[in-house]
């Protein structure tokens, strides 16, 4: 089943409430996906700085910070539940190599404005553990998972990020992900799990690195990705939604002058300001909708 | 009587509406703050009038019998699914599978519906003032689907003896669905349905009618790709 949600704020006055809005959306989608949950928050870009979202299997944050600061100059480590947000000027290629030497750490996403958190457990507990309510930013994407394709682990949780400031959440399942995984890995895209959605995320990263737009990439995906899906994809500049041509997997969009919200069910947006006077519609099958700067 | 879903539980509200004292004169109800909840007004069986102020979730007015339900908003998947009788009037848009498998009654949708409107309908009359999505009237067995706007792909796929009346464009027809000539009787059916939905009756001349070509009723090797 799974629940997916996304919100893009057009009016900056709501930026400080982004986490609060997303918390309500995730909580009401807990019934669609009680196994695990995750979310990506986009906040203002830090020039020449990268944020690495890392899941850690140890609580010795101080020691990790010490070890890392020996290898990397000018590093800031923030710990939230079992995640660390590591901020540094070091470029991804180099830093990811360093992270690989730390078995206790696994990278969940990186970029100049994205932070990703995901955890096994009921979404209501997960959002509490990460204090999602306190987050601010410009847009955010969330997922509540009912596991089908791979195990209930943090690795099997959404959102998936296979490129800088990118993320993807998915309701549905893909049937040709094994073949696609192999061909994407040959092209150098790193896919860590056996999950189908991570392959779709890799597919999008591959399209974007070929200088295609997100919209073009998602349209190409309609031909190349076999299965059923509603995707919400996030980038530094905004978010997009696409449903496969059969459109079994639900989605509803509410747009006001202040924000655009997407969710699997309307009830996830019922708490948003002025939603009853919003323009509410269902995305048509095989069509890409996007919002952004 | 006002029922506020912010103050009372959905189960309590539905129980109230499902167990009406038939001797009482309380026949008119209003539900506020539906907030996208599922199964609002499911399983009503008395001649009462319920107005829902706001947007609802899945299966709103499912299995309805006798009740007249008005939704001042949009509805989710499966509005009036398996309805037996009564009327459901949605002032906004409906999601997929509106009026699915319904045996009777009238479903009026002022806006659009998404895919599979009237899937497996068994006698209901559905009037959509806007457009319908793909696979509408899929395996429709009996009843009438009136569409004042356009229809998506595969309209009336594997249809049995239901009628489809449509004013706008049909993106494509499904297997075994074909255009039919409208006779006096069909025109009268359409006229009465348009009247029920307060659509100008003079519009009937702009409608086309579709139904089953009845080629898939019995197995025929020539049609093997269509089954």
Image (cartoon, coloured by chain):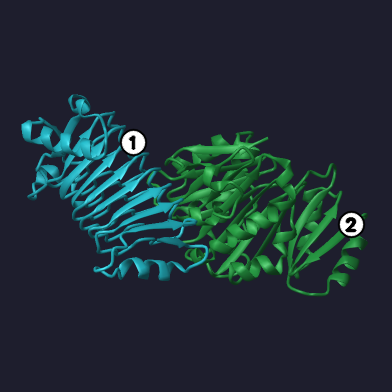
Chain colours: A green, B cyan
Residue shown at 64% from the left, 33% from the top: A211
Question: Can you tell which of label 2 and label 1 is closer to the viewer?
Answer: 1
> Can residue A183 be spotted in the picture?
no
- Above-or-below relation of A112 to A129: above
Picture residue at 14% right of the left edge, 39% below the top: B211
In this rendering, position of residue A153 left or right of residue B88: right
Toward the bottom, the furthest residue is: A59
> Where does residue A171 sit, x and y in percent of width and height?
49, 55
Q: How far apart are marks 2 and 1 (CA)?
A: 57 Å
B155 sits to left or right of B41: left
Residue position for label 1: B131
Position of residue B46 relative to residue A262, above or below, is below
Report whether residue A237 is seen.
Answer: yes
Q: Where is residue A268 in the image (x, y as percent from the top left)?
A: 54, 56
- Which secondary structure, mark 2? loop
Q: In this view, does B5 lie to the left or right of A54?
A: left
Q: What is the tally of numbered marks visible in this picture?
A: 2
Element assignment for label 1: loop
A147 over B198 or under it: above or below: below
Residue A169 pos. (x, y %): 57, 53
The chain holding disc 1 is B
| Position in image of residue B27 (x %, y %) | 30, 60
Instruction: Say the numbered circle drawn on residue A75.
Output: 2
Residue A69 or B178: which is nearer the viewer? Answer: B178
Q: Hey, which quadrant is residue B129 in on the image?
A: top left
Quadrant in which the N terminus of chain B is drawn? bottom left
Chain on which label 2 sits? A
């Amino acid at each position: 089943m799974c629940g997916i949600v996304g919100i893009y704020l057009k009016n900056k006055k709501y930026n400080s409430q982004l986490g609060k809005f997303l918390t309500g959306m995730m909580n009401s989608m807990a019934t669609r996906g009680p196994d695990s949950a995750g979310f990506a928050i986009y906040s203002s870009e830090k020039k020449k700085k990268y944020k690495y979202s890392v899941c850690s299997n140890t609580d010795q944050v101080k020691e990790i910070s010490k070890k890392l600061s020996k290898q990397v100059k000018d590093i800031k480590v923030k710990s939230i539940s079992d995640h660390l947000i590591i901020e540094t000027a070091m470029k991804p290629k180099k830093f990811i190599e360093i992270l690989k030497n730390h078995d206790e750490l696994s990278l969940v996403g990186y970029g100049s404005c994205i932070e990703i958190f995901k955890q096994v457990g009921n979404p209501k507990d997960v959002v509490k553990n990460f204090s999602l309510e306190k987050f601010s930013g410009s847009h955010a994407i969330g997922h509540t998972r009912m596991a089908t394709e791979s195990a209930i682990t943090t690795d099997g949780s959404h959102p998936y990020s296979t490129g800088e400031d990118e993320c993807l959440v998915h309701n549905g399942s893909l049937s040709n992900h094994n073949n696609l995984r192999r061909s994407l890995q040959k092209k150098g895209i790193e896919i860590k799990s056996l999950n189908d959605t991570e392959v779709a995320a890799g597919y999008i990263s591959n399209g974007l690195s070929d200088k295609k737009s997100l919209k073009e990439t998602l349209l190409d995906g309609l031909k190349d990705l076999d299965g059923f899906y509603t995707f919400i994809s996030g980038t530094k500049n905004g978010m997009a939604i696409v449903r496969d041509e059969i459109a079994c997997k639900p989605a509803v969009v509410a747009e006001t002058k202040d924000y655009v919200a997407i969710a699997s069910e309307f009830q996830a947006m019922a708490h948003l300001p002025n939603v009853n006077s919003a323009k509410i519609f269902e995305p048509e099958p095989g069509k890409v909708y996007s919002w952004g700067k | 009587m006002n029922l506020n879903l912010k103050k009372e539980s959905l189960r309590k509200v539905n129980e109230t509406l499902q167990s009406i004292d038939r001797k009482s004169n309380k026949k008119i109800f209003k539900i506020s703050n539906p907030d996208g909840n599922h199964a609002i007004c499911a399983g009503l069986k008395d001649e009462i009038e319920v107005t829902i102020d706001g947007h609802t979730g899945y299966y709103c007015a499912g299995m309805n019998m006798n009740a007249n339900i008005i939704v001042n908003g949009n509805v989710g998947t499966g509005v009036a699914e398996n309805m037996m009788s009564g009327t459901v009037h949605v002032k906004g848009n409906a999601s997929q599978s509106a009026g699915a498998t319904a045996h009777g009654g009238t479903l009026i949708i002022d806006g659009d519906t998404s895919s599979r409107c009237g899937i497996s309908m068994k006698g209901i009359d559905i009037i959509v003032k806007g457009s319908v999505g793909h696979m509408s009237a899929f395996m429709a067995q009996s009843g009438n689907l009136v569409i004042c706007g356009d229809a998506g792909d595969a309209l009336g796929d594997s249809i049995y003896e239901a009628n489809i009346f449509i004013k706008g464009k049909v993106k494509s027809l499904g297997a075994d669905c074909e255009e039919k000539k409208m006779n006096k009787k069909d025109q009268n059916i359409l006229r009465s349905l348009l009247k029920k939905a307060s659509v100008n009756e003079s519009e009937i001349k702009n409608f086309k009618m579709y139904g089953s070509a009845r080629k898939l009723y019995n197995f025929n090797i020539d049609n093997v790709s269509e089954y």
